[in-house]
Image (cartoon, rainbow, N blue to C red):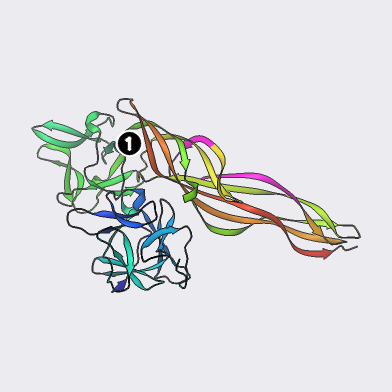
Amino acid sequence: MATTALPRHVVLNVPKAGTNTYIYREDDGSVVDGNNDMFSEFVKIEIERSKTDNIRVHLRFTYNNRYWQKDADDDSIVAVSTKPEEDTTKPSCTLFEPSQQSDALYFTHVQTGWRVMLNNSTQEFYVDQNSVGAPLEFVDWDTLVKLPKHVAFKGDNGAYLKAYDVDYNYLQFGSDDPNSVLSGHQRLFWPVKVGDNKIALRSAGNNSFCKRLSDDGKDNLLNAAVSTITSEAILEVQELVNEREIYNVRYRIEDGRVYGETPYLAGTTTVTNHADEDSSIAVSLKYADTTSYSFTRSVSITAGVTSSITAGIPGIGEAGIEVMSQISTSLNWNDTTSVTKEVSATGTVSVPAKSVAVVHYVGTTGSCDVPFSYTQKDKSSTDAKISVTDQIDGVFNGVNSYGFQFTIEKYQPITE
């Protein structure tokens, strides 16, 4: 049985006849099988490599930032830890070792050395000393394409795909209006992402990619005819929404995580004590404070919809993650916004008599991920109707510096 390298983000499922279900986390922390939606944020798992052993991994549900581990009281697998634990002597160890045999994926709980197994009655996962383990399958989440509900497709000839009924029913790249009712489509094929707003469609009927084809006296038909993605098979996706407003953003701070913390030197200065005795000396400096943030969601395609957002901006503070500011601005999902401002820092340091102190202003730079829900208000580009929906798939990512203090590197006597 060979070890296996997993993608960064996966969806895990237990193979079944007929239909697949996917592994997710219950509210009580139990890791169970049974979610029916491959695109659900509840089933997305990030594979984090061990810092000490490249074969071992941590499994983290990204929706609530909880790591898999063995329950402290029994053999069940739960996702309750907010931090990875690599100490294999601790029962709270979150390391697992993946291995693959044929097309089946298995996990071994490193701390016990036992395989991960599925209870077929409860659909809960547990570790079993004598089991060969539950055979699993995985899908690379980053290859999945979740399209908006209503879209238009533009072909390589610049025309939109439209339904026609001449002699028989067919689809043709023959419309110059994406908002035509006959140009609007719901998802019927398996999409493959080839760009920010471009896809190819693979037919479930013959597993071939659809392309623009002229044949049988008709031009620019949609035809599932090629095994590779040619230029004629690339479709530009346009969502049928004129305006979008994102508001009522509700952060789940309790499910946020802080990671990637590194020391940060904001600035250095010197202060002098001219007195004949030790003294507290005022110190001040200015530095450039940079923060950055982005908003992401589960829809894979950037389809050019003009969006706005009203929301708070979380950051890392002294007590953890907190909302630090507010914005009301245009929104491009996945784009990073950086803000730099000049900040003045003041304080006091103790300096010996007749000495110069070299003073650093130091803190920590870290990243935070915070899941959020929100309300989405859309204005249709086809009939101007307004639709309002509640969504739960948002993730905020932010980077900021915090925990600043003045520290003294060294003292030097004043030279007369």
Is 357 situated left or right of 181 in this image?
right
Helix, strand or loop under label 1:
strand
Q: Residue at x 55, y 37 (%)?
A: 326
Front-lying residue, 336 or 130:
130
Q: Which quarter of the image is occupied by the C terminus?
A: bottom right
Where is mark 1, residue-wise? 239
The answer to whether residue 193 is visible is yes
Expressed as whole percent of the image width and height from the top left, the position of residue 3 reads 33, 71
Q: Main secondary structure of the magenta part?
A: strand
- The residue that appears at 28% across and 71% down in the rendered structure is 131
Side of 89 relative to 120 (left or right): right
- Counting from the top left corner in percent of width and height, residue 223 is at 16, 44
Residue 50, position in %: x, y?
44, 67
Q: x, y percentage for residue 313? A: 53, 42
Q: Nearer the viewer, residue 121 or 117?
A: 121
Q: Above or below — where is 7 with respect to 391?
A: below
Q: Is residue 252 above or below residue 110?
A: above
Find out whether residue 341 is within the magenta segment: yes
Q: Is residue 143 above or below residue 411?
A: above
Which quarter of the figure has residue 115? bottom left
Check disc 1: other Cα within 10 Å, few if <14, some if 14-19, many if 20+. Answer: many
> Would you identify the image quadrant in which residue 33 lies?
bottom left
> How many marks do you count on the picture?
1
- Residue drawn at x 42%, y 59% as measured from the top left: 67
Q: Is residue 414 magenta?
A: no
Using the image as rendered, state which of residue 396 and residue 58 is in the foreground: 58
Residue displayed at 88% across by 61% down? 354
User: Which residue is the extreme one toward the left?
Assistant: 167
Amino acid type of the residue that numbered disc 1 sits on in the rendered structure:
Glu
The quarter of the displayed image where residue 176 is located: top left
- In front of the other: 96 or 76: 76
Query: Over which residues does the magenta segment extend?
Result: 327-347
